[in-house]
Image (cartoon, rainbow, N blue to C red):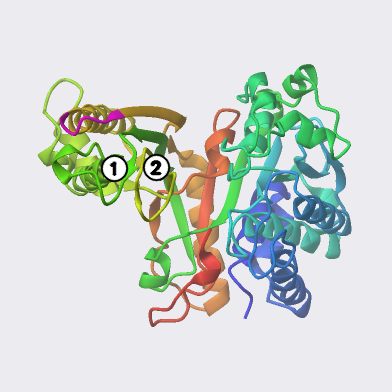
């Protein structure tokens, strides 16, 4: 049986081949060639790329790290194997392009990211790159790659996760033209900035060359992305494919709470200004607000019934990092720092939550006689996927399921995504949409989808 990667190939054929060729391939029987490329080779490459890591025992590839460079070279070789012309741009993105019958036509862009989080799953980002390459390799193998009615370009973006520089979408934001030149001076924990990291890998980027990376919107037809779902819904309903209609907006905060450092045994409880205890209360406030936003938000011109209802269905909040100083078991901390990741589909509702959260946090800190600094480190508005592309993807996903099973299936699920993806940045350039996949969802009983993490 061919894996769900087939659906992308079917959809690419349906929009970039002449109608007669497309109909022939879409109605054709499964053969060893398709299975070899779309299943055997694609899965093998996912596993191979999953072993390209900077760490021993788990997967980690950050922007311009040694493993990231090795992964980029490997992906570029696979692109060339599929018959694509390749290059690496000034932000380290890897491109593979075929011009087709009309090189001046608007291009279809397909992509995802080659970087990972710490202790990542092998499908995160890599799935979207490898499935696109595999789809085009099928076209090369059956002699139809040169018959495309528009150019197709696969892009492996150098950075989406933002792990190294705490700034997401470096790769896709550069292509979309929304990355400020100031991003080149953002430094990692070692003091190396983005520009230096690229220079260390023989990429001499300047402010001028960064601006030149932006694609002309008139040259692009659209962008699609295949991505692991990173959630339990598809597995739970037993579908390997889903269509995404929107991506949640996201805000990241850094909260610093400062109090009075002291000895754990000599400072009475009544005289303490403990930033750890204050932080614990702040985190509990965050959880309560995000579980029950309607109990905290006031109904006014900025927060109506529909906004609160949207928040009740989509709002999620996470504290993923926390650190203390001086971090000793017998010392009352002098400072505690923690992060907040807050996501929601309603942009106005997300702002209302942030306003309420900040006010209540300051009140708690004042009551506890500690200081509190709240910094907004990242903001991305929610993105609604293009309806035309979403409809095309839904058709392709249904066709793929029918081809896989030999029977008509229920309609594929339509999901809202709480995870951010390169499609968010690319939506500033062109119409964008994406599909979610859970490779393990054909198993009907619940399981640990470890490989989907990241």
Q: Secondary structure at mark 2?
A: strand
Q: What residue appears at the point 45 percent right and 75 percent down from the top-left corner?
A: 448
Give the residue number, with chain letter if any, for mark 1. 279
Is 55 left or right of 354, judged from the image as shown?
right
Specify the quadrant that holds the N terminus.
Answer: bottom right
Vertical placement of 288 versus 51: above or below? above
Query: Which quadrant would residue 45 be assigned to in this image?
Result: bottom right
Q: Secondary structure at mark 1?
A: helix
The residue lying toward the viewer, choosing from 299 and 200, is 200
The residue lying toward the viewer, choosing from 220 and 105, is 220
Query: Which quadrant would residue 122 be assigned to in this image?
Result: bottom right
Marker disc for residue 338: 2
Instruction: Give the x, y percent position of residue 265.
Output: 26, 51
| Magenta: main secondary structure | loop
Vertical placement of 431 versus 12: above or below? above
Is residue 368 located in the magenta-colored stretch of the structure? yes
Q: CA distance from mark 1 to mark 2?
A: 8 Å
- Decide: few, some or many residues near mark 2? Use Cα within 10 Å; few <14, some 14-19, many ≥20: some
Is 196 left or right of 285, judged from the image as shown?
right
CB contact under 8 Å: marks 1 and 2: yes
Instruction: Give the x, y percent position of residue 206.
Output: 80, 21
Q: Residue furthest front?
A: 266
Q: What residue appears at the point 41 percent right and 74 percent down from the top-left corner?
A: 238
Is residue 11 located in the magenta-colored stretch of the structure? no
Q: Earlier in the sequence, mark 1 or mark 2?
A: 1
Q: Which residues are magenta?
A: 367-371
Q: What residue appears at the point 47 percent right and 59 percent down from the top-left corner?
A: 230
Instruction: Give the x, y percent position of residue 28.
Output: 69, 71
């Amino acid at each position: 049986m061919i894996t769900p990667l087939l659906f992308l190939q079917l959809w690419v054929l349906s929009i970039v081949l002449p109608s007669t060729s497309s109909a022939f391939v879409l109605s054709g029987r499964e053969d060893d060639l398709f299975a070899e490329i779309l299943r055997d080779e694609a899965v093998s490459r996912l596993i191979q790329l999953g072993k390209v890591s900077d760490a021993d025992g788990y997967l980690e590839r950050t922007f311009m790290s040694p493993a990231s460079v090795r992964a980029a070279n490997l992906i570029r070789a696979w692109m060339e194997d599929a018959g694509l012309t390749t290059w690496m741009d000034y932000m380290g993105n890897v491109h593979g392009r075929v011009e087709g019958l009309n090189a001046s036509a608007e291009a279809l862009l397909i992509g995802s990211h080659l970087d990972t989080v710490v202790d990542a799953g092998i499908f995160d980002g890599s799935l979207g790159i490898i499935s696109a390459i595999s789809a085009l390799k099928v076209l090369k193998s059956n002699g139809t790659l040169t018959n495309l009615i528009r150019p197709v370009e696969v892009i492996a973006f150098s950075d989406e996760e933002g792990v190294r520089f705490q700034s997401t979408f470096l790769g896709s934001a550069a292509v979309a033209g929304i990355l400020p030149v100031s991003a080149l001076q953002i430094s990692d924990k070692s003091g190396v900035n983005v520009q230096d990291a690229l220079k260390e890998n023989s990429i001499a980027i300047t402010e001028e060359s960064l601006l030149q990376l932006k694609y002309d919107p008139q040259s692009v037809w659209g962008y699609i992305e295949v991505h692991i779902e990173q959630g339990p819904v598809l597995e739970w309903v037993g579908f390997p494919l889903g269509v995404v209609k929107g991506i949640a907006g996201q805000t990241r905060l850094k909260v610093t709470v400062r109090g009075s450092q002291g000895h754990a045994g000599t400072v009475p409880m009544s005289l303490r200004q403990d930033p750890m205890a204050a932080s614990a209360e702040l985190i509990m406030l965050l959880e309560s607000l995000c579980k029950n936003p309607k109990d905290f938000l006031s109904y006014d011109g900025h927060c109506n019934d529909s906004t609160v209802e949207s928040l009740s269905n989509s709002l999620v909040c996470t504290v993923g990092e926390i650190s203390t100083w001086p971090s000793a078991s017998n010392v009352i901390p002098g400072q505690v720092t923690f992060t907040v990741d807050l996501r929601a589909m309603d942009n106005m509702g997300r702002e209302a939550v942030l306003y309420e959260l900040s006010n209540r946090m300051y009140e708690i800190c004042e009551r506890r006689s500690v200081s509190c600094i709240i910094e907004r480190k990242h903001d991305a508005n929610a993105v609604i996927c293009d309806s035309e592309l979403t409809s095309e993807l839904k058709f392709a996903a249904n066709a793929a399921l029918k081809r896989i099973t030999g029977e008509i299936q229920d309609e594929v699920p339509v999901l809202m995504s709480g995870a951010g993806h390169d499609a968010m940045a690319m939506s500033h350039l062109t119409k964008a949409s994406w599909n979610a996949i859970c490779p393990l969802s054909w198993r009907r009983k619940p399981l640990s989808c470890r490989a989907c993490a990241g």
